[in-house]
Image (spheres, rainbow, N blue to C red):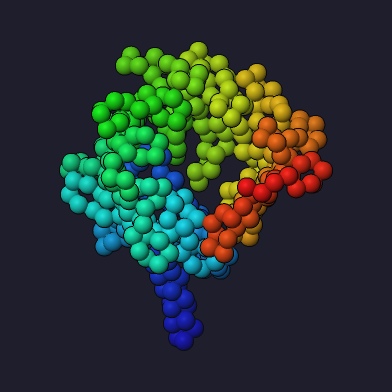
Amino acid sequence: MTRLLFLLCALLSTELYAQDTHAYLKWNIDHTQRTPRPAYPLTPQQSKSIDHYVLSHDARGRLTRVTFMHSGKPSPAGDYGAATLTLTYENDKTVEAYLNAEGEPMAAGGILRKIYHHDNTAFWHRLSFETTDGTGVTPTGYSEVRVERDNEGRVITETRFSRNGEIVPEHNGFAVASFAYDANDMALYRQYENAEGELLNGSLGYARVSFRFDEFGNFLSEEAQDASGNLTPMSAGFSRIEWRDFNSFGKPARVYYFDAQARPYAPYAYSSRSYTEAMQRDGVAYYGAEGQPAMHPAGFHRIEYHYKDDGSLAERKLFDASGTLITNR
């Protein structure tokens, strides 16, 4: 009887941990922009050393708080630029705000709050901003995002607007970005098309960026194509990039690059990557098609990342192919 009670208590404690701690390596891999979707749940032991997000929910199961943790403490080094992201819900909107490691309100990238407007619909259709300068304009120059959704609620178009109501092209130079999804609801592409569905080249010279992701939201490949379907260079110079040799936390050991003719990209064909115990990027080095050390166009062969105690980036050290330090940044 005692042994049975022990087993029941052990099972109950495991279930409570799964419900209450909510520690994940990734807090949101939802490409459809419906409901935040975490990936890579961590055990208590893993969360002692690996950077992660702690998720909290209200009684209705809605996400209310996300806190990025480094070495067991809240850290500003997460992907939203603050220690904690909070979500509050009203009938017609959801408000996203930010807290520092001490729990005090702060701005993330000049943005105090993001307001997701629902207008009594299931999912938001318009996004506006409150900024530190009072203009409501993001650092990249737009003040509103409007989306269209399909019958399943997935975002299928996204358009950005200025304060004057003019369209602001997004980072690929697309006036309007259109989407499609795979069976895991991961994005298949981001493209620019007219009202008739014809592909148009954006200001950077391509019409579509195609993706492949695994079920955990890790990039497998990305490539740019023009309106005729031909590979074309992205802003970084290469046309296709592939991530390979993943560890158990979805971190790739190698990344391969290709030109518009699908040949190894020059001046570098691949890079090798290493990671810290916390799963932060530790170093990146570049190599040619034959495995020889190669120089990045920015003037270095290898880059090392060094971090502050709170997990935020302190500096980058750049080295040439001989291992000589070039500079710190």
Q: Residue at x 26, y 55 (%)?
A: 88
Image spot of residue 64 (x, y percent)? 32, 58
* 163 to 274, vertically: above or below: above
Q: Residue at x 50, y 55 (%)?
A: 77
* 210 to 143, vertically: above or below: above
Image spot of residue 113 (x, y percent)? 30, 49
78 to the left or right of 303: left
**Between 146 and 173, which is closer to the camera in this rendering?**
173
Looking at the image, can residue 157 be seen? no
151 to the left or right of 6: left
Q: Quadrant of the N terminus?
A: bottom left
Q: Residue at x 26, y 37 (%)?
A: 125
* 268 to 217, vertically: above or below: above
**Between 229 and 128, which is closer to the camera in this rendering?**
128
Q: Place residue 86 in its image quadrant.
A: bottom left
> Which residue is most to the bottom?
2
**Between 16 and 73, which is closer to the camera in this rendering?**
73
Looking at the image, can residue 316 be seen? yes
Image spot of residue 223 (x, y percent)? 55, 27
Count of numbered circles in the view: 0
228 to the left or right of 97: right
Q: Place residue 98 in its image quadrant.
A: bottom left
Image spot of residue 123 (x, y percent)? 26, 42
Q: Residue at x 23, y 53 (%)?
A: 89
